[in-house]
Image (cartoon, grey):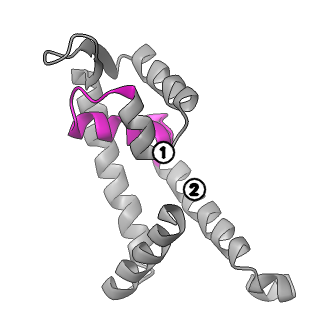
């Protein structure tokens, strides 16, 4: 396909976009049964790893604006996958926790993610995958 693009294939940003598109398509094919987006799964995962995490902390860790994070939290709450609760340590703070259904959904999502990661990592040696991870991190941590 890169041959079909001519000199446009020299544009690094385009290659990143095409790679992202391929990853997104594979993700969508393998996660259709869960009816969850990558962002929703990321929220579930962080809430599972950090019970009681505040919505603002989710936004910061996922590098999303608060409005987007709030919308994701509301969607997951409506599906009864997460719940809000006052912090035992600080009653002013509202934290998020997984429901039992949320924990089961996250377990299923983690299995699907493992398959998705295997598909992606199969394209690289271990050394290349580590290098790619480091290079991509350099972009978003800039």
Magenta residue span: 31-55
Q: Spatial distance from mark 2 to mark 1, Cα to Cα?
A: 9 Å
Q: Earlier in the sequence, mark 2 or mark 1?
A: 2
Q: Is residue 142 magenta?
A: no
Q: Is residue 39 magenta?
A: yes
Secondary element at image label 2: helix
The residue positioned 41% from the left and 75% from the top of the image is 134
Circle 1 residue? 38
Residue 6 location (% of width, % of height):
85, 88
Circle 2 residue? 24
Q: Quadrant of residue 22?
A: bottom right
Above or below residue 77? Residue 47 is below
Residue 94 location (% of width, % of height):
30, 16
Nearest the viewer among 122 and 39 is: 39
Above or below residue 39? Residue 85 is above
Secondary element at image label 1: helix
Q: Quadrant of residue 60?
A: top left
Q: Main secondary structure of the magenta part?
A: helix
The residue positioned 41% from the left and 73% from the top of the image is 133
The residue positioned 47% from the left and 77% from the top of the image is 135
Residue 73 location (% of width, % of height):
44, 24
Q: Is residue 53 left or right of residue 133?
A: left
Q: Quadrant of residue 78?
A: top left
Residue 107 location (% of width, % of height):
25, 40
């Amino acid at each position: 396909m890169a041959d079909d693009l001519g000199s446009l294939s020299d544009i690094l940003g385009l290659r990143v976009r095409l790679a992202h598109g391929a990853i997104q398509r594979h993700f969508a094919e393998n996660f259709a049964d869960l009816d969850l987006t990558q962002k929703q799964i990321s929220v579930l995962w962080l809430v599972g790893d950090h019970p009681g995490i505040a919505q603002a902390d989710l936004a910061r860790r996922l590098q999303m604006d608060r409005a987007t994070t709030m919308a994701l939290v509301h969607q997951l709450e409506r599906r009864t996958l997460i719940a809000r609760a006052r912090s035992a340590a600080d009653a002013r703070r509202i934290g998020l926790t997984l429901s039992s259904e949320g924990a089961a959904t996250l377990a299923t999502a983690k299995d699907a993610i493992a398959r998705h990661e295997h598909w992606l990592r199969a394209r690289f040696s271990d050394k290349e995958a580590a290098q790619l991870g480091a290079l991509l991190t350099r972009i978003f941590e800039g």
